[in-house]
C-alpha cells in the first residue's frame, strides 16, 4: 500500500511586542516610506527576554497538535528548522520534545537558513512515505532580532521573530505532500551570513570588534537570486507533480520582500493575489514565515480542501526549494477545523502554564545558584 504524508495540523506563535517602521525611524536612519516602498514591511514582532526559539516553537507545536487532534505522546519525530537556534547544542528540537511531553519522539534541528522549513517538510514527508514514522511535527522558529545589527539599516528593517508548525501524518489516502525540490549553491555563501559564534569564528573580542556577531547581507545580489529561484523552483515542483501552473490554487512564498513576491508572480505570469503575503505584519521570520503565512491564510478561509498549494522558499547557503501539496484529505475535515477552533483556548492555557512554569523554574534556579 502506498503511503502519503498529509498536513493535518498547523499552529503559530508570535511575540506580543510589535516594532513598527515609525519606531525604527528612531533607532536607525530610515523612514517608514522607504521601508514600505522597498520591502512591503510595516511592522515586525520582537521576542521579549523570556521568549526564545524553543518557547515560541513549543506554543506553535502545541497549537498544531490541537488542530490535528494528536496527543504529544503519539509524535514519532520533531524536526526544528531554525537559523537562530536556542544553542549550538543541544538541539532546539530536544527542548521542544521535553516541553510538549513527546515522550517517544526523536528530535533534531535542521539548518538550511530561510529555506529550512521547505527542507524539513521534504525530509519529514520522505520519512513518512518510507514507513519509518507515522506522525512528525515540523517547526520553523526564529528570534533573529537577537542577531541583527540595529545600526545596519540594510538588515535590521527586514527581520522579525516568530514560530510556525505543521503536523504531518501518514495515510493511505492519496494526497498531502506530492512533490518536493531542494537545491543549493554554496558558492553564494558570503552573500548572506551570520559568521560568528561557531567553529570558524568562536565568540571573542575580535569577533565583536569586526562586527561579525551580526547578520551580513548583500541585499541586491540576494534580491536577484531570490527572484530567479522562486519562479524556477515553483515551475520545477509543479512539473514534478505532473501539474500545470494554472492548476495551482495558492503559492505560499517565503516572506522576505513584497517586491520579490511581485517579481516572481510576474516571471511566472501569475496574478499576485495567488501568492499569500503577510509580510507587512511580520517582516522576514526566516524558517517561520511559510507556516505563519499558511496559518493566517487558513484563518482567512483561503486554503480549501482539494487546492494544490506550492510552498516556496530561499535563503542563505545559498539554498532554495519548493513543496507541492494537495491540501485537505482524510484529516482536514470541517469537523477538524471546528475542533481546532474550539480547542485553541486549551492550547493557549497550556502555553501560558508552560510560560509561568519556566519563570518559576528560572526564579528557583536563580535562587539556588545564588
Ligand atoms: C535590502 C533591500 C530591501 C534593499 O533595497 P534596494 O532597493 O536593493 O536598495 P539598495 O541596496 O539598492 O539601496 C538603495 C539606497 O537606499 C539606501 N538604504 C538602504 N537601506 C535603507 C533603509 N533601511 N532606509 C533608507 N535607505 C536605505 C542605501 O544606502 C542606498 O543608498 P545610496 O544609493 O545612497 O547608496 C533589498 O535589496 C532586498 O530586499 N534584498 C533581498 C534581501 C532578502 O530578502 N534577504 C533575506 C533573504 S532570506
Image (cartoon, rainbow, N blue to C red):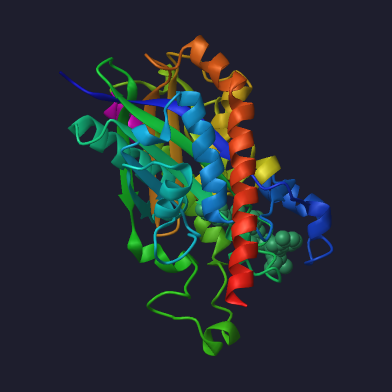
Asked if 308 appears above or below 123 in the picture, the reply is above
Q: Where's the N terminus, which quadrant?
A: top left
The reply to whether the magenta stretch includes residue 238 is yes
Q: Position of residue 301 (x, y in %)?
A: 60, 18
Can residue 277 be seen at all in this image of the molecule? no
The image quadrant in which ligand 1 is located: bottom right
Looking at this view, is 45 or 105 the one in front? 105
Q: In terms of image quadrants, where is residue 13?
A: top right
Q: In terms of image quadrants, where is residue 349?
A: top right
Q: Position of residue 102 (x, y in %)?
A: 39, 41
In the picture, measured across the screen, residue 37 lies left or right of residue 209, that is: right
Asked if 145 appears above or below 237 in the picture, the reply is below
In the picture, measured across the screen, residue 40 lies left or right of residue 68, that is: right
In the picture, measured across the screen, residue 13 lies left or right of residue 172, that is: right
Looking at this view, is 160 or 92 the one in front? 92
Q: Position of residue 174 (x, y in %)?
A: 28, 16
In the picture, measured across the screen, residue 128 lies left or right of residue 325, that is: left
Please, which residue is most extreme toward the bottom here?
206
* Residue at 70% from the left image edge and 41% from the top image edge: 281
Q: In terms of image quadrants, where is residue 212?
A: bottom right
Q: Position of residue 58 (x, y in %)?
A: 52, 45
Q: Mainly helix, strand or loop, the magenta region?
A: helix
Residue extent of the magenta highlight: 235-241
* Residue at 73% from the left image edge and 52% from the top image edge: 35
Q: Where's the C terminus, which quadrant?
A: bottom right
Amino acid at each position: 500500500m502506498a503511503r502519503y504524508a498529509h498536513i493535518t495540523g498547523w499552529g503559530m506563535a508570535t511575540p506580543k511586542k510589535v516594532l513598527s517602521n515609525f519606531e525604527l525611524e528612531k533607532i536607525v536612519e530610515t523612514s517608514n516610506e522607504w521601508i514600505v516602498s522597498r520591502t512591503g514591511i510595516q511592522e515586525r514582532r520582537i521576542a521579549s527576554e523570556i521568549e526564545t526559539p524553543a518557547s515560541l516553537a513549543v506554543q506553535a507545536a502545541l497549537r498544531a497538535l490541537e488542530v490535528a487532534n494528536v496527543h504529544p505522546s503519539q509524535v514519532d519525530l520533531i524536526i526544528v528548522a531554525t537559523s537562530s537556534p536556542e544553542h549550538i547544542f543541544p538541539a532546539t528540537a530536544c527542548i521542544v520534545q521535553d516541553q510538549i511531553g513527546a515522550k517517544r519522539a526523536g528530535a533534531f534541528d535542521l539548518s538550511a537558513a530561510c529555506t529550512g522549513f521547505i527542507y524539513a517538510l521534504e525530509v519529514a514527508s520522505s520519512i513518512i512515505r518510507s514507513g519509518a514514522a507515522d506522525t512528525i511535527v515540523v517547526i520553523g522558529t526564529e528570534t533573529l532580532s537577537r542577531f541583527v545589527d540595529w545600526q545596519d539599516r540594510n538588515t535590521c528593517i527586514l527581520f522579525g521573530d516568530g514560530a510556525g508548525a505543521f503536523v504531518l501524518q501518514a495515510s493511505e489516502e492519496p494526497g498531502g505532500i506530492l512533490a518536493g525540490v531542494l537545491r543549493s549553491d554554496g558558492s553564494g555563501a558570503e552573500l548572506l551570513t551570520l559568521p560568528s559564534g561557531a567553529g570558524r569564528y568562536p565568540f571573542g573580542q575580535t569577533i565583536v570588534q569586526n562586527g561579525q556577531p551580526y547578520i551580513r547581507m548583500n541585499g541586491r545580489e540576494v534580491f536577484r537570486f531570490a527572484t530567479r529561484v522562486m519562479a524556477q523552483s515553483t515551475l520545477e515542483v509543479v512539473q514534478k507533480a505532473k501539474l500545470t501552473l494554472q492548476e495551482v490554487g495558492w503559492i505560499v512564498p517565503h516572506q522576505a520582500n513584497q517586491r520579490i513576491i511581485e517579481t516572481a508572480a510576474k516571471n511566472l505570469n501569475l496574478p499576485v493575489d495567488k501568492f499569500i503575503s503577510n509580510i507587512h505584519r511580520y517582516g522576514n521570520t526566516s524558517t517561520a514565515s511559510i507556516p505563519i503565512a499558511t496559518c493566517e491564510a487558513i484563518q482567512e478561509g483561503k486554503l480549501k480542501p482539494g487546492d494544490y498549494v506550492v510552498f516556496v522558499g530561499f535563503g542563505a547557503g545559498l539554498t532554495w526549494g519548493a513543496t507541492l501539496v494537495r491540501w485537505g484529505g482524510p484529516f482536514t475535515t470541517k469537523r477538524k477545523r471546528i475542533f481546532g477552533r474550539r480547542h485553541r483556548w486549551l492550547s493557549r492555557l497550556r502555553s501560558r502554564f508552560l510560560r509561568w512554569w519556566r519563570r518559576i523554574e528560572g526564579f528557583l534556579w536563580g535562587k539556588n545558584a545564588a
